[in-house]
Image (tube, grey):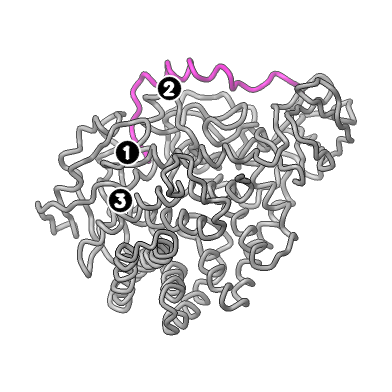
Amino acid sequence: MNFISPCLAISLYLLFTANISPQENNFYIRLNQVGFLPEDMKSGVILSEEEIPIDKFIVIDQISNEKVYSGKIRKSDNNYSKFNKCYNFDFTKLNDSGKFIINVGNESSSPFIIGEEVYNPVVDSLMLFFRIQRCGPTHPLMHKKCHLLDASIIISSASDTSNNSVDVTGGWHDAGDYVKFFSTSALTTYMLLFAYEFDKEKFGFDNDNNNVPDILEEAKVGLDWLLRCNISDSLFVVQVQDEQDHNVGWRLPEDDSLRFGRPAFTGLSKNLVGIYSAVMSLASRIWSEKFSSDEFANRCLTSAIQKYSMRQNINDIDSTHSAFYNDKNYYGKLALGAIELYNATGIDNYLEDAVIYGDSAKQDFWWSWGDVNSLTHYKLAKVIPRFTDYIKSNINYFNAKKDSSVFNEGVNYTWGTTTSLLGAALQAILFKSLTGSKQFDSLIILQRDYILGRNPWGLSFINGIGEKYPEHIHSQIAFFNKGNLPGALSAGGAPVSIINEYEIARSDSSFSLFNSQSAAYFDDWNNYITNEATIFGNATALFVYGYFSKRK
């Protein structure tokens, strides 16, 4: 979100950018800086403005300093911006575990690891981000409990304001500001529950040893807040705080000067009813099966059934007060609510609704907070296999797109590129789960690798992960913690046309050499387009990297 940074950002920028300036080389090696599973496809890219007089690469074991593999460098069919000579290299046949670097002539890559558990630390870091985003008395990380008076004002329309208070404490701040949204909080909570249900072994880890899987512990933060937002049979609180949050300077959440008058905005619509019913229905099954907590499970399911029953008499789409996160239609999310209600109750009417809404949703050829139809089609395909075809249509689109770029991106650059790339991988994972097909394994791995360094800027877009990563993420908590925001997924490169539209003042030019009109990135405190993290983006990343994790 857009808020104004103090002038101190400039001096901090100078302090923190020293270690991520681009190399002064004739060519640049780009690959996943975290590493690979032994059986993975393993590849990298070389960017150059002219032909390089080298035809092979060497893999060096960093412990023994010995050569363990070598191979041919091959010219790419694609180029990038002014880098007219791009090359690919592949070392898939190297299956040995260890820590390695790639040498091309006198140039070396970032170090990387090959091993079975290489992605566990990535997942653990991504989980920490949600604790940092926690609001209220929820034991947050890196800041104190905050916004304990949410909310003293209820606004149902521009002309209808009440001074009555409502308890909507808790939940998560959506991004770098301190606004809370029902839509993204519900979707994020669903994604956490969905991941756990998808693979309880991979997502059932309990790092804090309290006998509750960490991912369910985090989901409970979302569930509790959503239940508080269900303030009556006919209303949700859909947003807490508004644009005034962006106009009072940077501060830690516990020091928020606006904490005494944060408004709560209300609404109800088919899209919100859909995602709420989905979350609560899935939660009811998990809490009943995992914890034998029938009281909480029944509360969730009763709430889901009641809200879903309202769908015929409410607006199709409910816009948030700030016009953020406005869905285009309601079909996909309402279908998701219906299929999860069917899964929880076994009532055929819900399945019939889900089929009608699911077919109306169709393919979305995308992934974002408003484009999650593949979740619906995946759940429907578990019952009615033909819904797999919708997911495959999406993946065919992403797969064709990846073949037209040297970095093999499956989607066009946009605001929130990293989330959309990982969403393409997520959908391919769902297709593989349904069919057993390995047809799109390369799509999955190449999107995964792009995020971790196989991209124009040679950055891992997850804070604290890899050798080089964003150090000036657009987050107030990061700003007051020397750029540290563990596990935060930066939004990544975006078209210059989008960035210029918002006229963002910035001082960073560290990566200008690698920017193009279609994809520019700035590691700058102020740049909320390329350098902000969101809870939904992190939930998407958590699923994808969790898929590659292995727990003992």
Question: Which quadrant, please, contains the C terminus?
Answer: top right
Secondary structure at badge 2 equals: loop
- Find out whether residue 80 is within the magenta segment: no
Viewer-proximal residue among 105 and 351: 351
* Amino acid at circle 1: His
Secondary structure at badge 1 equals: loop
Secondary structure at badge 3 equals: loop
- Check disc 3 and report the residue beneath it: 322
The residue located at (38%, 63%) in the rendering is 292
Q: Bounds of the magenta span?
A: 1-26
Question: Which quadrant, please, contains the N terminus?
Answer: top left
Say which mark, if any, is on residue 482. 2
Q: Quadrant of residue 208?
A: top left
The residue located at (37%, 34%) in the rendering is 141
Q: Is residue 451 left or right of residue 128?
A: right
Q: Residues within 10 Å of mark 3 (few under 14, many from 20)?
A: few
Q: Going from the N terminus, do you reach mark 2 or mark 1 first?
A: 1
Say which mark, if any, is on residue 454. none
- Residue 88 in view of the camera: no
Q: Going from the N terminus, do you reach mark 3 or mark 2 first?
A: 3
* Amino acid at circle 3: Ser
Viewer-proximal residue among 524 and 230: 230
- Find out whether residue 4 is within the magenta segment: yes
- Check disc 1 and report the residue beneath it: 139
Of discs 2 and 1, which sits in the foreground?
A: 1
Of discs 3 and 2, which sits in the foreground?
A: 2
Viewer-proximal residue among 482 and 10: 482
